[in-house]
Image (spheres, rainbow, N blue to C red):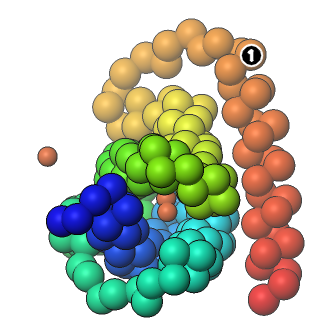
Amino acid sequence: MKGIKDLLIEELYDIYSAEEQIVEALPKMVAASESPDLKKAFQSHLKETKGQVQRLKKIFKILKVEKKEKLCKAAKGLIQECKEVLKNSKTKSAIRDAALISKAQRIEHYEIAAYGTVRTFAKEIDLDTIVDLLQQTLDEEGNADKKLTEIAEGGLLKTGINQQANMPNEKSTKTNRSKTSTRTNKKSTSSKKLAAAR
Ligand code: FE
Ligand code: ZN
Ligand code: FE
Ligand code: FE
């Protein structure tokens, strides 16, 4: 290992592999979701993730390096856990959606850690354009993670799971819920557009 730039490039290869694996995995998550909101969230993150792959290609171009084949083993393991959810329960349910969210958020957190680090590496050596590009992706990963939390908290856990667990509904904060549905509606509009574009 020569210096911080080499370390940055190594880590970008790893992230590139992770994103490619995620592009492959997300359509399965879309298909497996019972909640329409979750389906839309995965769908829109798939579109975003494809953009993130393009962003990384752009960064490799700026750095004047060929993208190298390197397998991100962490992403492989995290995606494997998503597949296990589907293997262990064959039918759609709110519980299975919650399990998928749980696994998907582990992926987002891995990406948040990875992009935060490479963004900081790039900042250290004043690669400003690259910092901006990485920050854009970092923001998208953060929003994807928040969105999944909103779906889990804003209905999914309050209806399906509580029913199945025979637990009384807790008093919910109305404001939070309406905020959630507003954001959800915004997202669903863009997902509809996405679907229409196909
Ligand atoms: Fe990503
Ligand atoms: Zn990795
Ligand atoms: Fe662990
Ligand atoms: Fe992501």
**Residue at image location 59% in from the left, 76% down from the top:** 62
Is 61 placed above or below 80 here?
Answer: below
Residue toward you, 90 or 194: 194
Measured as percent of width and height from the top left, residue 185 is found at 81, 47
Classify the position of the C terminus by image quarter: bottom right
Measured as percent of width and height from the top left, residue 23 is found at 48, 78
For label 1, the SS is: helix
**Residue at image location 77% in from the left, 57% down from the top:** 188
Q: What's the residue type where badge 1 is placed?
A: Thr
Q: Is residue 50 left or right of residue 196?
A: left
Q: Quadrant location of residue 96? A: bottom left
Measured as percent of width and height from the top left, residue 9 is found at 37, 69
Classify the position of the N terminus by image quarter: bottom left
Is 190 placed above or below 51 here?
Answer: above
Q: Is residue 106 left or right of residue 56?
A: left
Is 154 placed above or below 18 here?
Answer: above
Q: From where the camera sits, is residue 1 visible?
A: yes
Residue toward you, 144 or 191: 144
Measured as percent of width and height from the top left, residue 104 is found at 39, 55
Residue marked by disc 1: 175
Q: Is residue 182 left or right of residue 155?
A: right
**Residue at image location 57% in from the left, 56% down from the top:** 127
**Residue at image location 23% in from the left, 65% down from the top:** 2
